[in-house]
Image: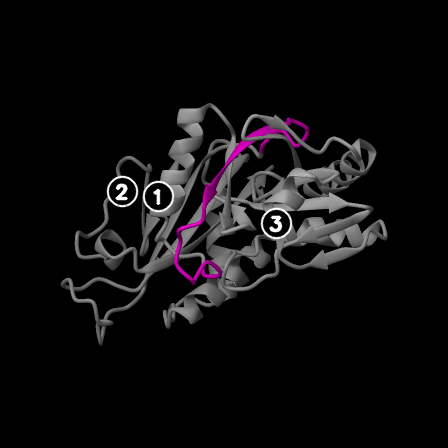
């Protein structure tokens, strides 16, 4: 198979799989998701992503029938069915299937979606150009929910502007990007927004923080401003697909690029970790 779609036990190519119109994901976005990548049919940090989707589900009072171990085993089994072992690995739970009603359905069982298609992580060493926009999302950004319209609009603004990402801010405080985290290096320390309800604390962010600690780079979790962002020694973007990418322009103005050796050291370390974890 070149692609794979899974829905509650049904398996087929992605463009052939269908889901019920009454799945609450379809009209409320009532669910949670997670995503990672595989290489050589080995899913990178799968346990970490599975634990996060279960944590997000619990915050929405969605209780899947499958266990975390069961989901890991299922994904690992499905990945092996593909012709290519280098894959985008996406999975989500919706609350269930029932007639449209804002209240939780009483007896509906959560639905499990899995989508697999050929894809590679991004080039870690490619330099990025971004724009900034006011963060208009709700106060549940720590839940990796299906309600992504503000991120969709911000991403389209990037497409229209011909740039790579959109940095979001609430007033003067930087939060994260449309679909990634952003941190800064300043005076030898990594500064990143606290893991609270204003951001989704990504796995890439966690790996970057761990890498910094490995190299004895202090990590400071605190809010920082747009002015601090633009005056930082380096600006680093992280996500499941972007292990450690350097931002060099914000709103058309050159930024950072004052600690290239530190960035390269972190990039090399994180890329080596991905390659090592996904070797045959």
Residue 183, relative to residue 58: is it above or below? above
Per the rendering, the mark at residue 17 is 2
Q: Secondary structure at mark 2?
A: loop
Q: Position of residue 269 (x, y in %)?
A: 77, 41
Q: Residues within 10 Å of mark 3 (few under 14, many from 20)?
A: some
Residue at image x 60%, y 27%? 253
**Left or right: 265, with 9 as reference point:** right
The earlier-in-sequence mark between 1 and 3 is 1
Neighbour tally class for label 1: few under 14, some 14-19, many 20 plus, Cα within 10 Å: many
Q: Is residue 53 above or below residue 126?
A: below
Q: Nearer the viewer, residue 143 or 225?
A: 225
Q: Secondary structure at mark 1?
A: strand
What residue is pinned by disc 1? 5
Of callouts 2 and 1, which one flags the residue occurring earlier in the amino acid sequence? 1
Q: Position of residue 31 (x, y in %)?
A: 34, 59
Residue 111 x/y as whole percent: 31, 60
Please provide the residue range marked out in magenta: 122-143
Q: Does the magenta-highlighted stretch encompass residue 187?
A: no
Which coloring applies here? one colour
265, 173: nearer the viewer: 173
Tag 1 and tag 3, C-beta contact below 8 Å: no
Q: Is residue 68 visible?
A: yes
Locate the N terminus and report the quarter of the image it occupies: top left
Residue 225 is labelled as: 3
**Residue 19 location in percent, x, y?**
23, 49
CB atoms of marks 2 and 1 within 8 Å: yes
Q: Compute the Cα span from label 2 to label 1.
A: 6 Å
């Amino acid at each position: 198979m070149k692609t794979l779609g899974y829905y509650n036990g049904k398996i087929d190519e992605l463009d052939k799989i269908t889901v019920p119109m009454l799945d609450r994901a379809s009209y409320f976005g009532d669910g949670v998701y997670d995503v990672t990548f595989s290489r050589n049919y080995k899913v990178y940090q799968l346990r970490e992503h599975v634990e996060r989707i279960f944590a997000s589900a619990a915050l929405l009072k969605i209780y899947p029938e499958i266990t975390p171990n069961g989901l890991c085993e299922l994904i690992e089994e499905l990945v092996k069915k593909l012709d290519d072992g280098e894959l985008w690995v996406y999975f989500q739970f919706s609350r269930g299937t029932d007639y449209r009603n804002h209240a939780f359905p009483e007896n509906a069982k959560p639905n499990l979606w899995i989508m697999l298609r050929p894809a590679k992580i991004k080039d870690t060493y490619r330099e990025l150009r971004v724009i900034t926009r006011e963060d208009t999302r709700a106060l549940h950004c720590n839940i990796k929910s299906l309600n992504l319209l503000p991120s969709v609009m911000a991403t389209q603004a990037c497409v229209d502007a011909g740039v790579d990402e959109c940095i979001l801010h609430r007033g003067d405080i930087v939060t994260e990007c449309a679909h990634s985290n952003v941190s800064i290096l300043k005076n030898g320390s990594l500064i990143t927004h606290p893991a609270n309800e204003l951001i989704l604390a990504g796995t890439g962010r966690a790996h970057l923080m761990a890498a910094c600690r490995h190299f004895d780079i202090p990590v400071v979790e605190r809010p920082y401003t747009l002015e601090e962002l633009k005056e930082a020694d380096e600006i680093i973007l992280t996500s499941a697909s972007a292990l450690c990418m350097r931002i060099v322009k914000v709103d058309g103005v050159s930024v950072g690029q004052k600690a290239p050796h530190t960035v390269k050291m972190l990039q090399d370390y994180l890329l080596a970790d991905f390659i090592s974890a996904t070797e045959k």
